[in-house]
Amino acid sequence: MSKKSKKPENQICANKKARHEYFIEESFEAGLALQGWEVKAIRAGKMTITEAYVIFRNNEAFLFGAHIQPLLSSSTHVSPDSIRTRKLLLNRREIEKLSGAINQKGYACVPLSCYWKNSLVKCQIGLALGKKQHDKRKTLKDRDWERDKQRGFKQHLD
């Protein structure tokens, strides 16, 4: 019996730590401005966003700290920078909303996942509020309770 993967077919990578560390208030879909070698490496599954975050400069959004490991075959003629700052493609209203919330209300902006949409790479970013330690424990307790509850129902059905 093989273990099923919960990862959707079009998903490239996910930041599981973000949902543990933050309350996600609202999420946005943003395009990523990438170079050719980066797209090839992403197709090979060489991208991680666990340490990444979103910064705002000059009314533009940037993904900082996302790591794309270059492929040896596709990056021979360029000098790849695996953790370069990549531009996020959002419209002006979304950028203003996100940067206003970060500057005034103490929110953070974190990448939640990256995925393919047709032939484009999209990044789901979330407007997040940091959790305290007791909130993290409560989340874990609720998740365990839901899992135990589902197991109990399955045992009664069998």
Image: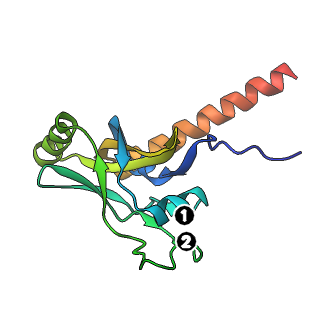
Q: Position of 80 compared to 141: left or right?
A: left
C-alpha separation, residue under disc 2 versus residue under disc 1? 8 Å
Q: Position of 137 compared to 26: left or right?
A: right
Label number found at residue 41: 1
Q: Position of 5 compared to 101: left or right?
A: right
Residue 93, percent across and down?
17, 34
The amino acid sitting under disc 1 is: Ala
Q: Which one is in front in this view, the residue at disc 2 or the one at disc 1?
A: 2
In percent of the image, x 58 and y 56: which residue is there? Answer: 43
- Depth check, front residue: 100 or 25: 100
Q: Pointer 2: residues within 10 angstroms few (<14), some, or many (20+)?
A: some
* Location of residue 136 with respect to 40 vertically, above or below: above
In which quadrant of the rendered view does residue 1 lie?
top right
- Depth check, front residue: 154 or 88: 88
In percent of the image, x 53 and y 36: which residue is there? Answer: 142
Q: Pointer 1: residues within 10 angstroms few (<14), some, or many (20+)?
A: some
- Farthest residue in the top direction? 157
Residue 88, percent across and down?
30, 50
In percent of the image, x 46 and y 62: which residue is there? Answer: 36
In which quadrant of the rendered view does residue 28 lie?
top left
* Location of residue 146 with respect to 67 vertically, above or below: above
Element class at badge 1: helix
The amino acid sitting under disc 2 is: Ser
In percent of the image, x 88 and y 23: which residue is there? Answer: 158
Residue 25, percent across and down?
31, 35
- Depth check, front residue: 27 or 118: 118
Q: Which residue bears the numbered disc 2?
A: 74
The reply to whether dot 2 and dot 1 touch (C-beta < 8 Å) is yes
Element class at badge 2: loop
Q: Earlier in the sequence, mark 2 or mark 1?
A: 1
